[in-house]
Every structure is written in structure tokens, then in C-alpha cells.
Image (cartoon, rainbow, N blue to C red):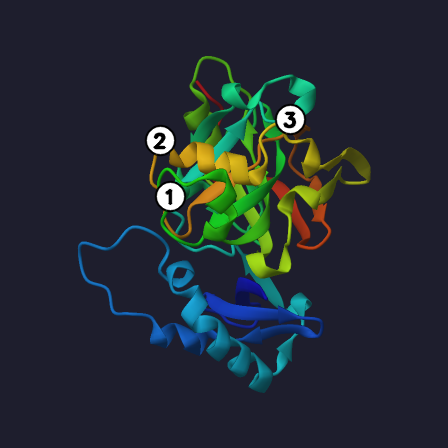
Amino acid sequence: MKICRFTRNDDAARAPRLGVVREGGIHDVTAVTERLPALRWPLPPGDQLIANLAALRAPMEDMADGAPAIPLSAVSLLAPVANPGKFVCGAGNWKHHGAPLGMLGFMFKATSALAGPGEGVQIRWPDRDTLHEPELAMVIGRECSNVSEDEALDHVAGYTCALDMTLKQEREDFAFCKSFDSYGMLGPWLVTADEIADPSALSYRFHVDDELRGERSFADLTGSPAQMIAFASTAMTLYPGDLVLSGAADVAPVHAGQTMTLEIPGIGTLVTVVSNSPKARRRD
């Protein structure tokens, strides 16, 4: 199943909707969210929809069967996960970097950086380089802590394309440089784990405008998706909706006016535009 979040272009209120993506377009299944448990403070950790996805899949399929298809051209796509608890970003995780698994590290990104392809990447500090980092995102579906490598993928709800945008570092730490608004780009939708037998068998092509910036196989990760999840879970509990990003091999600047296209066959194609934020300012 392919699951997306979107707004309709003809909706002045731009209310977020939930959809099932099929060949003919998007089928609106927002009504299924009425079946989610009522929440009261203190809220449980994790994304509520992802945590209940297994129980909602059958009614989502039924609703999609009865809903007309909405063309992709009629919507703006949001990030497919609404409320991730954390971005866990792989570092030094490609074989050409020469880092063994024991050296695999992670960096982190504030969840306020979350954005979808229809929102675009918005640069706030145009006097500094913003770098692209095309990656695979694993979306955790069930709480796990200290999980084994053999069991790690059983805790994945699905996969999506990710652009782990990063301000080129000077003195600031990486968490700050990764956490600008819109620098956590996900999309175009979530593909549920049952459709991806082996995430290491996936590959990507990444373009900026017409320039090919990278073409790689995730089999060349130093730590596989299963190893990454298992390793991260030795230190922290992972909750539904948490995002584990593969780490990037193709890192270079992008500028306002450029279009980034990340294609992962079996998942989809994330297309998003880079612009200067209305809040852009020079760093004094």
C-alpha cells in the first residue's frame, strides 16, 4: 500500500488529507482517522496513525475502493508521516567512506524541519551553502529497544524517499545545521513494508535540474537498514513514526530556483523545488 498526506489545490483552507495512492491517482481515506483512539494529555510517544496502521489498513482499502481518484496534479503532497518523534540520521554509512559498522554513527534533526515535496526546501540563510543529501528513510512502525538485526525490519512500517538537507557546517553542530525549517524533506508517499522485501536491494537516481548528481545501490551501505535500526535501538527506544535515514553519499550545494528529483524504484519519485524563504536573512 502507498499512503500519502496531501492538501487539495482547490481547498482554500489547505486542510491536510490522508490518501491511498493507486495507479489512477489518490483516493481520499481521511475518514478512517475517525477510528483512531481519542488522545488526552500526556500524549503517548509516536505518530498515532503509524502506531495504528495495521488495524486501519483494511478499512483504508475499503474506503479507497469507493472513493474517486484525485489526479496528482490537483494536490500538494505533504510529508507522509505527520508526527515523527525523531530523525535519526546515519553518518559515514557508505562503503566508499571506509567506515566499518562499529564506527557507524548518527546525527539528529529537529522534527520541526519536516516538510513534504509540495512545500519545497526554503533556504533561510542564502549567504551560506545548503547541501543536499539524498537518502532512504525507514519509518518505524512498532516500539523497539535493543532489537536484534534479524528482527529489526519487523518493526518497520514502511519506506519513503528523504532529502536530509544540511547547512554547510562552520562552527555550529550538525544537529543545528540539519534542523532548519523544511530541511527534513520526505515523500512522495509511504510504501508499506510488505511491498519491500529487502530495502538493501533498492537503489536511487538523484538529479538537480538536468544534472545527475548520484546513482547508487543501498546494497553499498556500510550498515544495512536492519543493522542501522538494531544499532540505534541499543541506545534509544524507537517509537512509531520515528525516522531512520540511511546516510548520504552524494552531498553538494543547491540554490534557489533549482529542482531536486530523487527516484527510488519501488517507492516513487520525490520532486521538490528550492527557494529562498520569505524569512530569509543574511547571517550577521
Check whether the beta carbons of the residues at disc 1 and disc 2 lie within 8 A of each other: no
Q: Height in image: 240 above or below 24?
A: above
Q: Secondary structure at mark 1?
A: loop
x and y, in percent, of residue 24 in the image: 71, 75
Return the disc, 3 or 2, that comes first in the chain's sequence: 3
Label 1 – label 2 distance at C-alpha:
9 Å
Q: Is residue 268 left or right of residue 186?
A: right
Residue at the limit of the structure toward the left, as seen here: 41
Q: In this view of the protein, which residue sits in the foreground, 253 or 107? A: 107
The residue wearing badge 1 is 238
Label 3 – label 1 distance at C-alpha:
23 Å
x and y, in percent, of residue 104 in the image: 52, 23
Q: Is residue 180 visible?
A: no
Residue ID at (62%, 27%):
222
Return the disc, 3 or 1, that comes first in the chain's sequence: 3
Figure quadrant of the C terminus: top left
Label 3 – label 2 distance at C-alpha:
21 Å
The residue wearing badge 2 is 235
Residue at the limit of the structure toward the top, as seen here: 171
Q: Based on the displayed image, in which of its 4 quarters is residue 274 positioned?
A: top right
Q: Which amino acid type corresponds to the residue marked 1 in the rendered image? A: Leu
Q: Height in image: 233 above or below 36?
A: above
Q: Is residue 281 left or right of residue 188?
A: left
Residue ID at (34%, 52%):
46
